[in-house]
Image (tube, rainbow, N blue to C red):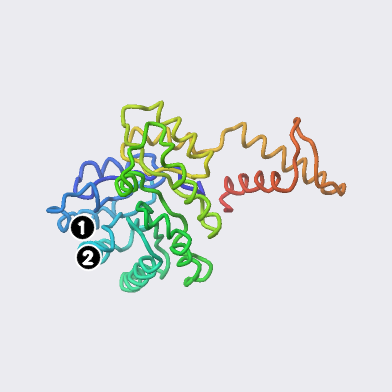
Amino acid sequence: MPFFRSFLFAPGNHARRVEKALALEADAVILDLEDSVALSDKPAARRPVAEALGRPRKSRLYVRVNAMRTPYCYRDLVETVGPGLDGVVLPKVESAADLHAIDWLLANLEREGGLPVGSLDLMPIVETAAGVVRLDRILQARSLKPYGERWRVRRIAFGAGDYSHDLGLSPTHEEPELAHARARLVLASRAAELEPPIDSPWFHLRDAEGFRRAVERSRRSGFQGRLLVHPDQIAIANEGYAPTVEEIAEAERIVAAFRAAEARGAAVIELDGQMVDYPIAYRAERLLKALRGEG
């Protein structure tokens, strides 16, 4: 898949859960050094995370370090960045300076570790009022293109738990209180030419149907995938964020019919009772390109 449907967290200091996560069908696993690790155990959690980088796995592998303003972030990166790692998840990002600083450090760690400079993804989590308000300025940092055509920041993620705490919100089950922040992430991502963003974890672990509805809302709102906190959520996310057979077939019909119309000099057609013009045809083409891994 060119896009990520499922990012599964696993606490970096819990060897059994890390081993289990690496064998599951998530698109990516995030070995966590932040919220799931107690303060007293944070320094010790780095070594097992670094050791896990060389283990067999089915997914891409990321590490979530602690926020830049903590005393842990620097050593988290220094002790875990190395061969086998695909990217870094940076929580509580609130400025473009955060991304510039981490990018500089990652570039030096890549050089020291024999990795191509710029090869590691950097995925910021926006989860504070300051982060949402400054989102456009934050994403200006990714426009520098320091590594040829490969940008370090390819997507951002939303952290609803910390965001709600920061604003004093008490979201109801369907989370309409968070719709504005989610819309900001989708809009800013598109304006900055990033991939669609990754949505926040769903914390109602025993409500599978509620999670299905949340995934459906999320996908229709412009998110490509989800941060997950439990293995049982993987299948629902992988299915819910993937285009359906019907959607793929419709896209193929639209592209074929519109190309034929263009050859006749027409730019607006009716197909299956629906008007199809360039925006609709481009959207169908984008879906098919994503399935082919072209973007």
For this rendering, which residue is in front, 195 or 118? 195
Determine whether the residue tagged by mark 1 lies in a helix, strand or loop.
Answer: helix
Residue 22 in view: no
Q: Position of residue 126 (x, y in %)?
A: 38, 54
Determine whether the residue tagged by mark 2 lies in a helix, strand or loop.
Answer: helix
Q: Residue at x 37, y 69 (%)?
A: 97
Write down the residue under mark 1.
Answer: 46
Q: Is residue 100 above or below residue 191?
A: below
Q: Which mark is residue 206?
A: none
Of all residues, the one furthest to the right in this rendering is 264
Write down the residue under mark 2.
Answer: 75
Crowd around label 1: few <14 · some 14–19 · many ≥20 (10 Å): many
Of all residues, the one furthest to the left in this rendering is 40
**Residues at discs 2 and 1 in contact (Cβ within 8 Å):** yes
Q: Position of residue 67 (x, y in %)?
A: 28, 59
Q: Residue at x 30, y 63 (%)?
A: 81
Q: Is residue 232 above or below residue 52?
A: above
Which amino acid type corresponds to the residue marked 2 in the rendered image?
Arg
Q: Position of residue 50 (x, y in %)?
A: 24, 58
For this rendering, which residue is in front, 264 or 186? 186
